[in-house]
Image (cartoon, grey):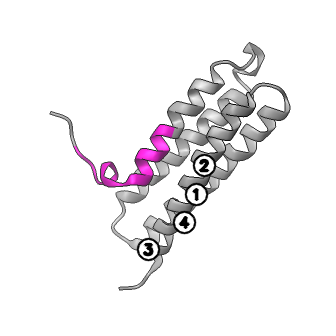
Amino acid sequence: MKATFVYHKLKVWHLAKDLVKEVYRITKGFPAEEKFGLVSQINRAVISVASNIAEGSGRTNRKDQAHFTQIAYGSLMEVACQMEISFDLGFVLESDLSSVTNSICTLSEKLSALRNAQLRTE
């Protein structure tokens, strides 16, 4: 039986996980010499988005939750920057950049909303 954790209930986590799969698919096509450079950096950043959402969901304090959501947002912006640079270097197709950018925009809006909700006092 598969365990269910709090983050499994979060739409933002599912979107982040989908983004991980999309980015990994794209970075598989990068030049071999980028394996330990840009590919590694992008993949670590995109994994950080989903991981920080999950870690924050395990915190009981709303301010702590918001802190991890903010870290996830920062990692998401890192992915956006790195994908733009990868496009400029000719490693990413325009259609892939557009798709990833759309996913990042959607996820960034949802992360901002989640963080605002976490910071609201009850």
Whichever of callouts 3 and 2 sits on the residue coming sooner in the sequence is 2
Q: Which residue is mark 4?
A: 112
Kindly report the distance in space between the C-alpha atoms of the residues bearing marks 3 and 2. 20 Å
* Quadrant hosting residue 36: top right
Asked whether the beta carbons under mark 4 and mark 1 sit within 8 Å of each other, the answer is yes
Q: Residue furthest top?
A: 32
The location of residue 106, given as percent across then percent down, is: 55, 54
Q: Is residue 65 left or right of residue 108?
A: left
- Separation of marks 4 and 1 at Cα, in angstroms: 6 Å
In contact (CB < 8 Å): disc 2 and disc 4: no
Distance between the alpha carbons at the discs numbered 2 and 4: 12 Å
- Image side of residue 84 versus residue 58, left or right: right
Query: Does 11 appear in magenta?
Result: yes
Is residue 103 visible in the rendered image? The answer is: yes
For the residues bearing labels 3 and 2, Cβ distance under 8 angstroms: no
Q: Nearer the viewer, residue 117 or 94?
A: 94
Q: Which of the pair 71/97 is nearer the observer?
A: 97
Classed neighbour count for the residue bearing mark 2: other residues with Cα under 10 Å, few (<14), some (14–19), many (≥20): many
Circle 1 residues within 10 Å: few <14, some 14–19, many ≥20: some
Nearer to us: label 3 or label 2: 2
- Look at the image and give the residue range highlighted in magenta: 4-18
Q: Quadrant of the C terminus?
A: bottom left
Residue at figure coordinates x 80%, y 38% from the top left: 85
Query: CB of mark 1 within 8 Å of CB of mark 2?
Result: yes
- Front-most of 76 and 106? 106
- Which quarter of the rendering shows the N terminus? top left
Q: CA distance from mark 3 to mark 4?
A: 9 Å
Q: Is residue 53 above or below residue 43?
A: below
**Could you tell me the amino acid type at mark 3?**
Ala
Where is residue 91 shown, x and y percent of the image?
77, 25
Q: Which residue is mark 2?
A: 104
